[in-house]
Amino acid sequence: MALPPGKLYFTLFEKELILVLVKPHLEVIENKETNGVTSAEKAKAFCEITKQLNATDGVNQRTAKQIRQCYLNLKKKLRQKSTCLRQELRKTGGGEVAKEVELSTLERRFLEEPILTLPLSTPYDSDTSQMEILKSQDKSNADDPFVRPLTPSQNASAEASELDTSSMNFLDSSLEVPESDYEKLVLETPEPSSVSEASGVKTPKQRSLRDTLMMFRKNTKKQAAPSAAARAAACIEAEHKQSIKYMQKEEERKEKQAEADRKEQELRMDLLREKIKLTKTKTLMHEKLLELMNKNPSSLSFLKNVLSDDC
């Protein structure tokens, strides 16, 4: 029984084609804003992707909703697969991993290129400059008792930042004007000395050596503390070195023990040889005494004396 048109599964070729077609529109599709403008842009992008997909030979006709859901499923699976791959690589120490976890060439290329996203803007983000933070306290909040007013130093720094940015924007725009207006733009460009005098901020030439050194010391960052993984790795390495030292000492002890056993065995063999020699000597002496007794029976008393001395 054939499946209805809406229930046709996506083939591998169609999935790869969706990833290829989505790539140029990632900046719009992955936008995190949820207003009406971005929603319309996303719908327009998926409509364009749907037209391109349906115009390709060998694919089934799809709707924009189906393509969008397929892309979301593919992105979720790619993230899960990438996470499993990182975990397996950490387990094996960078060695071979299972084939089920390996990424294809298209998946690897899709993940290597960063997904462009537009984060939600906030005036108190870590990437926001001091000038933008100060600008967020607008004049409408001047009468609010819960808003702290700007200090004179903050006003001066904000004005200096505005002058610096305005002069930079002015110079950037001057690059696009024709050469006939160049002299006019040069006359209107503010001098660095006037900017420093108006803002009350000292230029590097006006600062003393001590102030400059203090500024660099304040800007230097302290060395970050090692992470838990780094500490664990250091502990494992120290234990490994300690175990290696223990094994080396154990090998040296075994070698010394074997050498002592060998010397003891040699001494025992020498002692045994001496005992054998002594036994042979006694045997020869007894044989001579027996011969003497057989030849001269009167020497029996002498033999008794010898035997008593031996005992």
Image (cartoon, grey):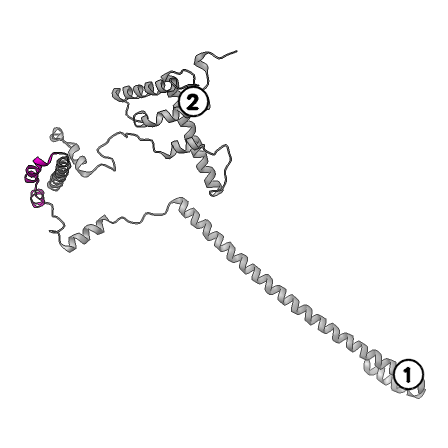
Tag 1 secondary structure: helix
Magenta region, residue range: 177-199
Q: Main secondary structure of the magenta part?
A: helix
At x 35%, y 27%, the residue is: 23
Q: Could you say which is closer to the camera, residue 34 or residue 188? A: 188
Q: Could you say which is closer to the camera, residue 294 or residue 188? A: 188
Q: Which residue is mark 1?
A: 291
Percent from the top left, x then y, of residue 279?
80, 76
Asked if residue 274 is positioned above or below residue 253 in the image, the reply reads below
Visible residue check, residue 263: yes
Percent from the top left, x then y, of residue 144?
13, 30
Q: Which residue is mark 2?
A: 14
Task: Specify which label sits upstream in the sequence, 2 or 1.
Answer: 2
- Residue 162: quarter of image: top left
Pointer 2 local density, CA inside 10 Å: few below 14, some 14–19, many at least 20 = some
> Was residue 257 drawn as part of the magenta stretch in this picture?
no
Visible residue check, residue 311: no
Looking at the rendering, in which quadrant would you find the C terminus? bottom right
Tell me which amino acid carries mark 2: Glu
As drawn, is 106 to the left or to the right of 2?
Answer: left
Percent from the top left, x then y, of residue 187?
5, 40
Asked if residue 269 is positioned above or below residue 139 in the image, the reply reads below
As drawn, is 193 to the left or to the right of 273?
Answer: left
